[in-house]
Amino acid sequence: MLWLALYLPNLPLDVCPATATPPRPRLVVESAGRLERVVAVDALAQSLGIRAGIGLSAALAFVNELDVHRRKPQAEAEALTALACWAQQFTPTVVIVEPAMLLLEIGGCLRYFGGLDALRGRVEAGLAALGYAAQTGCAPTPLAAGWRAEQGMAGAITELAGVRSGIAPLPLTVLRLDARRHEGLAQLGVSTLAELLALPRAGVGRRFGPEVGLWLDRALGVVADPRTPFVPPDRFVRCIDLDYPFEQVDVFVRLAERLLAELAGYLGGRGLGVQSVAFRFVYDALPASLLDVGFGRPLRRCDDMLAVLRERAGRIVLDAPVFAVELRAERLHELDGQPLSLLDQRQRHGDLPLLLARLRARLGDDAVCRIAAVPDHRPERAWRIAGDGDTGTLQPDLVLGERPGWLLPEPLALAVRDNRPWHDEPLRAIGRAERIESGWWDDGSMVRDYWQAVGPSGRRYWIFQDRHSLGWWLHGVF
């Protein structure tokens, strides 16, 4: 077995989006008795001398204008769950180690991804694209991999025989022992695992309890270290709670980009797609409102979903300042693989369902509609406006000839010159006539001979001669 540990030390900061404009130093604090202690800072705050572990009052002494966020354990847990779903695209065995670590068993996946370096590079690049900063560690046991990730030791240990030397330089603090045991080991001059491993195991067990030896044996692979694999949820629900409300639609689009990126990771990990999502806006005094966004077909890529949302942005109206934005994707679809052209990589831009979804988002649902067939010989009555998925009930034997792509709303009367119909040019009938005689049961009785016709320009028309009046009419253009 081979484990890849992903340690996210800045997870509290990553789940707190910046709201200040222009950007100010950002930090996350948590309650420590009567005081508030800094637990995470961004690069700007760090450059000003603010460090994790100091009090909020001390941080304000460095800089009096800070973007301060309170720690949100539930949001951190949700983010870790979303990342666990995303990580399942690399391996089916993912383990969550709270509060900020994932363990991936990658021993059986290396060949598929082209080796350890290639797989590790893809994981790290994917995390960066999602906006997370992670330290990685690799070892044959989960404990050793996790310890090395926490300490920023990026070198990989691939053989069990190398674990002992690989964990030896680690500080004793990686062991989850109580303060009394750490203090007792410190009094013996033990500060690293190498020094602890050099002590007699029996004596250490009698003085400090069997847990110390058990930690070491699990890390070295001497005894089993079973882990409970992560089971992904059946639906995606993610909420961003804000310390400061917003009223601008462009701020919502930036938050939605973050949410859709996490949704794309969740879908990629499970091999699923989503055809519609719902955004829920939480206000202070008003009831929450919903924004439904449809994509035309099941999607997985964040860019495709975001393109539809941006088309919709111009018509979004926020009822009041928004304190939280929630994204829900409850109806998930199996997303089958799509055949790709070997030479033409641009074919995805011809995605008709996605184009229709973007048009609806920009123009409104009523501005884009589908046409369904109606079992009627008369061309102007052989179609109707229909909803999604409604294709009508056209009988194959009703259409005998080729039909034009453009049908005029009403037939246009044509002049006749030298016994030939005219439409800005003389027209010549080609092929055989198609007689349509129908409608005697209602007010639309007709007897027509339809022809394809061409002119000197090369344009092709669909014309007919009324058998009662013998007049010529233009009905469509090919």
Image: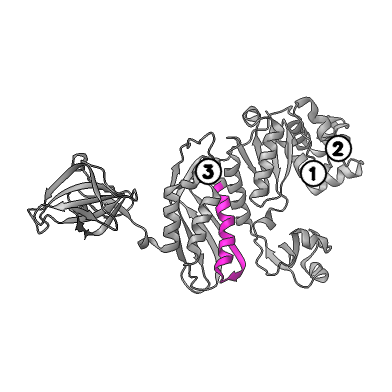
Going by the numbered disc 1, the residue's amino acid type is: Gln
Tell me the distance, in whole angstroms, between the alpha carbons under discs 2 and 3.
Answer: 52 Å
Going by the numbered disc 2, the residue's amino acid type is: Pro
Visible residue check, residue 104? yes
Q: Main secondary structure of the magenta part?
A: helix
In the rendered image, residue 226, in percent from the top left (x then y), is placed at 64, 33
On screen, residue 14 versus residue 78, left or right, reads right
Tell me the distance, in whole angstroms, between the alpha carbons under discs 3 and 1.
Answer: 44 Å
Please determine whether, in this image, residue 354 is positioned above or below residue 160: below
On screen, residue 368 versus residue 476, left or right, reads right
Measuring 74% from the left and 27% from the top, which residue is drawn there?
222
Measuring 40% from the left and 63% from the top, which residue is drawn there?
364
- Classed neighbour count for the residue bearing mark 3: other residues with Cα under 10 Å, few (<14), some (14–19), many (≥20): few
Please determine whether, in this image, residue 428 is positioned above or below residue 367: above
Q: Is residue 284 magenta?
A: no
Q: Secondary structure at mark 2?
A: loop
Look at the image and give the residue range highlighted in magenta.
240-264
Q: First in sequence: mark 2 or mark 3?
A: 2
Going by the numbered disc 3, the residue's amino acid type is: Arg
Write down the residue under mark 1: 151
Q: Which mark is residue 434?
A: none
Q: Nearer the viewer, residue 344 or 358?
A: 344
Q: Secondary structure at mark 1?
A: loop
Please determine whether, in this image, residue 111 is positioned above or below residue 380: above
Write down the residue under mark 2: 169
Write down the residue under mark 3: 346
